[in-house]
Amino acid sequence: MIPTPHLSAEKGLIAETVLMPGDPLRAKFIALKFLENPIQFNAVRNMLGYTGTYNGKRVSVMGSGMGMPSMGIYSYELIHFYGVKNLIRVGSCGAYQPDLNLRDIVIAMSASTDSNYASQYGLPGTYAPTASWSLLQKAVAVAEAKGYPVRVGNVLSSDVFYDADPETWKRWAKMGVLAVEMEAAALYMNAAYAGVNALTILTVSDSLVTKEALPAAEREKTFTQMVEIALALA
Ligand code: HPA
């Protein structure tokens, strides 16, 4: 079913490895700044997507939108209709732990969630959405080789940005969850169900602990490090 309900790309235009920032304009920025010969393959709903090369390897970058339903739709179509094998979310997160600082890089080994997304699989228990070991270990090795410090652990993929209960996050923090974002669990479940690879790399943009937040203009340096790690996985 190509084009899909949400993507207008023709067959063959999307690489086997796709980086997925939440913001489609971030996808455009990454394509224009990091890829050689980027070609735009999608603009449906302004969800911009591009394919180019990085160090001679073909790679795509496309927005995911915000939240698990949006990530769920786009990652599903990339996997099932375009044959994508490696999906790497690059995004931001809010720190849940006092020893995480603004601009730190977090790699989501696993993604707990308050969403009901897993109910579609009819499992008789609680599923643990997990990153692909192959991508995770390579990302950590690349970060070490480049001298970029990273924290690896559990994150929360939440359906709620503005929580009615301002204390809920502390219960996740008590369980060692490093940070909150809104898409990784859907990506990990879609990838697991389809037998493909997924990883999420995040930059701390704010802290629930200290209430600090990074001004948008200041994000670029760490953002660049996160994207360099992700592109090295292509
Ligand atoms: N909550 C949810 N998602 C986020 C946050 C947050 O505080 N910061 C960056 N992504």
Image (cartoon, grey):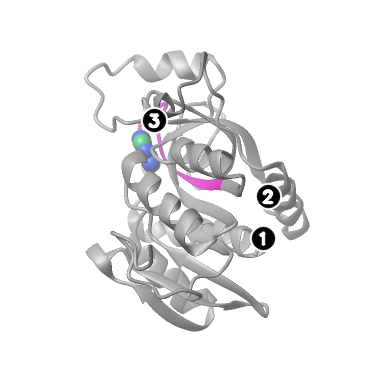
Q: Mark 2 sits on what residue?
A: 135
Expressed as whole percent of the image width and height from the top left, the position of residue 113 reads: 44, 26
Q: Secondary structure at mark 2?
A: helix
Q: Is residue 18 left or right of residue 164?
A: right
Expressed as whole percent of the image width and height from the top left, the position of residue 84 reads: 54, 60
Task: Give the mark nearer the N terminus: 3 vs 2.
Answer: 3
Q: Mark 1 sits on what residue?
A: 233
Residue 67: image quadrant is top left
What's the residue at 40%, 29% (across, down)?
120
Q: Is mark 2 within 8 Å of ligand 1?
A: no
Q: Is residue 210 magenta?
A: yes
Expressed as whole percent of the image width and height from the top left, the position of residue 21 reads: 43, 56
Residue 7: image quadrant is bottom left
Image quarter of the C terminus: bottom right
Q: Find out whether the residues at labels 1 and 2 contact each other: C-beta distance under 8 Å.
A: yes
Image quarter of the N terminus: bottom left
Expressed as whole percent of the image width and height from the top left, the position of residue 200 reads: 54, 46
Q: Secondary structure at mark 1?
A: loop
Q: Nearer the viewer, mark 3 or mark 2?
A: 3
What segment is highlighted magenta in the picture? 200-211
Alpha carbon separation for disc pair 1 and 2:
7 Å
Amino acid under label 2?
Leu
Most prominent secondary structure in the magenta stretch? strand
Q: Quadrant of ligand 1?
A: top left
